[in-house]
Image (cartoon, helix red, strand yellow):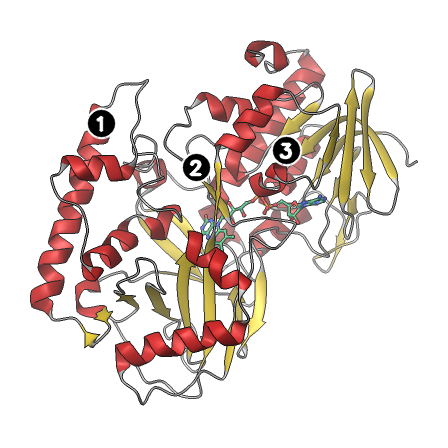
Amino acid sequence: KATRVSVIIIGAGMSGITAGKTLSENGVKDLLILEARDEIGGRMMTHDFGGITIEKGANWIEGVNGPNVNPIIPIAKEIGLVNDRSDFENITNNIYGANGKVDLEVAEPANKFIEDLYESSESLALRLTNDTDVSVLTAQRFYGRFPVTPVEMALDYWYNDFTSAEPPRITSLKNTQPLPTDAIFGDDVYFVHDPRGYKSVVHHLANSYLENKNETITDNRLKLNTLVNKIEYSKEGVEVTTKDGTVYTSDYAIVSVSLGVLQSTAIDFVPDLPFWKLKAIYTFDMAVYTKIFLKFSKKFWSSGSGNKFWLYADERRGYYPIWENLDSEFPDANVLMVTVTDEESRRIEQQPDSETLDEIMGVLKNMFGKDVPTADDIYVPKWVADPLFRGSYSNWPVGAEPIVFQQLQAPVENIYFTGEHTSELYSGYVHGAHLQGMSIANSLLDCKKNQKCAPTAQVYDN
Ligand code: FAD
């Protein structure tokens, strides 16, 4: 058994590291951070591919140029993180189908229809009373017509699934349109491309309170390669057991693992978490969003302004639909990125990468003709299979009321919960994870120092 500390934080992603910073700045320095991986950053994670450093997880600082400043922007500026505004323009000119480029006569009216459809669902969202919600698809039906052709489906995917990672049939209308991130922080986004990675934002926060040498953390309050598999809690305190059998004890714990991990049986809570907590955990969705990377020996596409994103409109909705070339960020790398989500992500995770490459080459040949050269290399992240994440980020499904968030973040005895999935306004985002880390640490401090403890079990028990 190790020495008892005030707070054990489980998980060193954005949320856990931010929680530790807030505690530390408020005088709680006897803390311990337990992280299963060999580095901090969680879903902000780089991968070396095709001679460049790509972002396997979070890539964009989302919510830029709005009425309020996204808290990630000042940090990114302070460390000089390279990021550029993404160029989403001209999408109608970049739609491809089974027989090559789609004519503007088809693409333009389809885009106008989907844009109008999106706006009409947004106005329906504003008409919903507090206690009602419908799916985005329900709202689309009110419009009288919904996407049916491959081009309409690809554009529908671009406006909806590309953000929420789940189809309109599943996503809550009331809570995603208008999207709080866009309304509060702005609808522009910055694409991070820096050899240090987007994770350097988390490193910067960590270095402000954890001892480090040349930016490498040496503080023994951070334990890497430490997988937690049991959390026992009672009025007397918390006992956290790791895979190697070590038991760490504390007064409080903050659990920052992903919703997907909470939905799995990876961590054994003793006693079992109460029914209301489990119901909230199981009600919310852990979506899957997969960026597949491809390296080519030469470019067979046109780059430059207005050519950044392309859509592939297949008969099967969501079949390798969104393409982005990384030319402006890495001019000589010849790397393409294709995004899939939800069932397609799950399906692709199950097959060998060579089969995925064959499917992708078939799609590229449909788009650009039979002379397209085969990619030299492919990288397919497997978010569902990864026991430390079990998905990519949370999405608000129809039927989950806002009380679910209060329940997701409410403590159970002395166990606090943070992470992107506990953010009512910004779930799914880096800034959501950051703001929740602060907020949950503050709520723990309020309990510890002022005996003002957040409502726990008794409020939600039935
Ligand atoms: P995590 O980052 O998951 O941190 C939790 C930590 O807990 C991890 O380090 C994990 O290793 C650790 N852990 C898990 N289980 C255990 C255990 N049993 N014991 C010990 N440690 C454990 N957001 C944006 O804002 N913009 C984007 O462009 C964007 N794109 C994304 C693309 C993808 C593919 C993915 C996956 C995510 C994306 N996100 C994006 C979401 C963003 O990455 C997350 O919201 C945010 O990083 C979550 O931080 P967190 O601290 O809540 O969780």
Residue plotted at (13% across, 57% down): 110
Residue sitting nearer the eye, 357 or 93? 357
Q: Is residue 151 left or right of residue 268?
A: left
Q: Quadrant of residue 259?
A: top right
Residue plotted at (61% across, 9% down): 458
Element assignment for label 2: loop
Q: Which mark is residue 168?
A: none
- Queried on whether the Cβ of the residue with tag 2 lies below 8 angstroms from ligand 1, the answer reads no
Above or below for 437 versus 91: above
Q: Is residue 140 visible?
A: yes
Q: Is residue 286 left or right of residue 87?
A: right
Image quarter (top left, top right, bottom left or bottom right) of the C terminus: top right
Residue plotted at (27% across, 84% down): 369
**Percent of width and height locating residue 335:** 43, 76
Above or below for 56 versus 259: below
**Percent of width and height locating residue 363:** 33, 74
Q: Is residue 178 left or right of residue 259?
A: left
Q: Are marks 1 and 2 in contact (CB under 8 Å)?
A: no
Where does label 2 land, which residue? 426
Where does label 1 land, which residue? 126
Q: Residues within 10 Å of mark 1 (few under 14, many from 20)?
A: few
Residue at the extreme left: 105
**Percent of width and height locating residue 122:** 21, 36
Q: Is residue 362 left or right of residue 119?
A: right
Badge 1 or badge 2: first in the primary sequence? 1
Q: CA distance from mark 1 to mark 3?
A: 36 Å
Where does label 3 land, which residue? 22
Q: CA distance from mark 3 to mark 2?
A: 19 Å
Residue sitting nearer the eye, 181 or 247? 247
Kind of residue at badge 1: Leu
Q: Residues within 10 Å of mark 2 (few under 14, many from 20)?
A: many
